[in-house]
Image: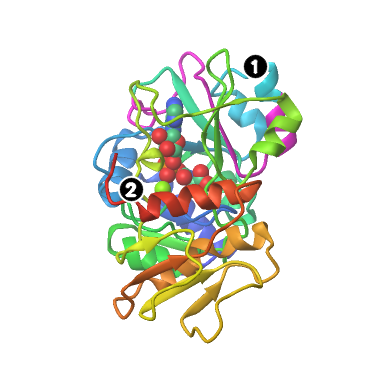
């Protein structure tokens, strides 16, 4: 059930969360499937609803930096990044505080925890109303396109969750950037709403996860095939086939072609990021043989856009 975010519906959603239920929660990046991070059963219900193939750790959402500091240990770098980018589309992987109340299922039993303070009024109101840390992966079935509107959540998970709060369209439109600050060398694990350039401007050069690192986690967002439409997707295409849909970028688009959605006619990467998932949802239709995506420059938010397109295009999971 989709309800517009009002003080009344937010109170109802908070009651659902306190009782161990799940709520579709708008954030500035994508809609999250939120549950009480301290409650093993609520966290297990998140995995079940998403049909995630394995119990990967989830991001825990908090209303303030102070609340985040009660759950994890912040290095100097972490404190600087929090000051600069929270609330906002940055997730930090940090050493967990001893005696943290967070469910071990949410952290996959790791000594670290992924934290984020989202920059969205409804998410903020909901977290304050329920007074709980909220575990929230993107509110879509595992592997599918992420949701940037309440109706996307309804379509993918409507039958599996108790309430979806409609907080409008997500302004950033891509998941948060994940930076691991739990080791000696800060490392970007997932490109997202904050660019590499923005992070490096605050803490200097950082490592990039190379996809080969072995360890206990293979994050779903790091699986090769992810964020995928049900029809094939090809990248870097300037001359689509007649029966394909074109996901265009920029002013220079093929003449006489009908099935087009343009991520940004002016070539604005921020606008393109915000439109990406919405347009993939719209073009994911069996009347097309596939989706052809035009080249997107590989800097700033373009890196995260290309990362998602690459995974959407991949045929294999690993
Ligand atoms: O924008 C976002 O981040 C959205 C919104 C709803 O906040 N959430 C989101 O969550 O994308 P999810 O669960 O789809 O992605 C969580 C990512 C996964 O790739 C997971 O493996 C990684 O965070 N992660 C969580 N805890 C971790 C940890 N302790 N160490 C390394 N990676 C971790
Ligand atoms: Mg996801």
What residue is shown with label 1?
Answer: 75
Which residue does the image show at 51% across and 54% down from the upper left? 30
- Tell me the quadrant of the picture where the N terminus can be found: bottom left
| Horizontal and vertical percent position of residue 55 | 29, 34
Q: Nearer the viewer, mark 2 or mark 1?
A: 2
- Residue density around tag 1, few if under 14, some if 14–19, many if 20 or more, within 10 Å: few
| Horizontal and vertical percent position of residue 170 | 57, 60
State the extent of the magenta-drawn residues as a range. Answer: 80-108
| Horizontal and vertical percent position of residue 144 | 34, 56
The answer to which of 145 and 14 lies nearer the viewer is 145
Quick one: SS at disc 2?
Answer: loop
- Is label 1 within 8 A of ligand 1 (CB to nearest ligand atom)? no
Which residue does the image show at 33% across and 77% down from the upper left? 288
Measured in 3D between alpha carbons, the distance from the residue under mark 2 to the one under mark 1, in whole angstroms, is 33 Å
Horizontal relation, residue 177 to residue 49: left or right:
right
Which residue does the image show at 33% across and 41% down from the upper left? 42
The answer to which of 81 and 124 lies nearer the viewer is 81
Kindly indicate whether the residue at mark 1 contacts the one at mark 2 (C-beta within 8 angstroms).
Answer: no
- Tell me the quadrant of the picture where the C terminus can be found: top left
What residue is shown with label 2?
Answer: 225
Horizontal relation, residue 89 to residue 21: left or right:
right
Q: Quadrant of residue 245?
A: bottom left
């Amino acid at each position: 059930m989709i309800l517009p975010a009002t003080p009344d519906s937010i109170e109802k959603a908070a009651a659902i969360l306190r009782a161990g239920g799940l709520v579709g929660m708008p954030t500035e990046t994508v809609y999250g499937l939120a549950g009480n991070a301290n409650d093993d059963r609520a966290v297990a219900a998140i995995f079940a609803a998403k049909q995630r193939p394995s119990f990967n750790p989830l991001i825990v959402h908090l209303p303030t930096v102070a609340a985040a500091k009660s759950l994890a240990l912040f290095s100097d770098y972490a404190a600087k990044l929090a000051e600069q980018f929270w609330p906002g589309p940055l997730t930090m992987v940090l050493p967990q505080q001893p005696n943290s109340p967070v469910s071990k299922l949410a952290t996959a039993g790791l000594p670290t925890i992924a934290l984020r303070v989202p920059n969205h009024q409804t998410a903020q109101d909901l977290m304050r109303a329920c007074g709980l840390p909220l575990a929230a992966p993107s509110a879509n079935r595992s592997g599918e396109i992420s949701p940037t509107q309440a109706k996307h959540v309804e379509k993918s998970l409507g039958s599996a969750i108790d309430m979806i709060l409609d907080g409008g369209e997500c302004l950033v439109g891509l998941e948060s950037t994940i930076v691991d600050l739990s080791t000696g060398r800060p490392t970007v694990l997932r490109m997202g709403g904050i660019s590499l350039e923005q992070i490096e401007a605050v803490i200097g050069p950082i490592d990039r996860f190379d996809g080969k690192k072995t360890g206990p986690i293979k994050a779903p967002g790091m699986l090769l095939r992810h964020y995928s439409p049900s029809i094939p997707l090809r990248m870097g295409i300037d001359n689509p086939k007649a029966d394909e849909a074109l996901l265009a970028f920029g002013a220079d688009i093929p003449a006489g072609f009908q099935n087009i959605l343009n991520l940004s006619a002016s070539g604005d990467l921020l606008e393109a990021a915000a439109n990406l998932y919405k347009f993939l949802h719209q073009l994911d239709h069996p009347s097309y043989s596939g989706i052809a995506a035009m080249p997107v420059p590989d800097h700033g938010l373009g890196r995260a856009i290309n990362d998602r397109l690459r995974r959407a295009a991949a045929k294999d999971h690993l």
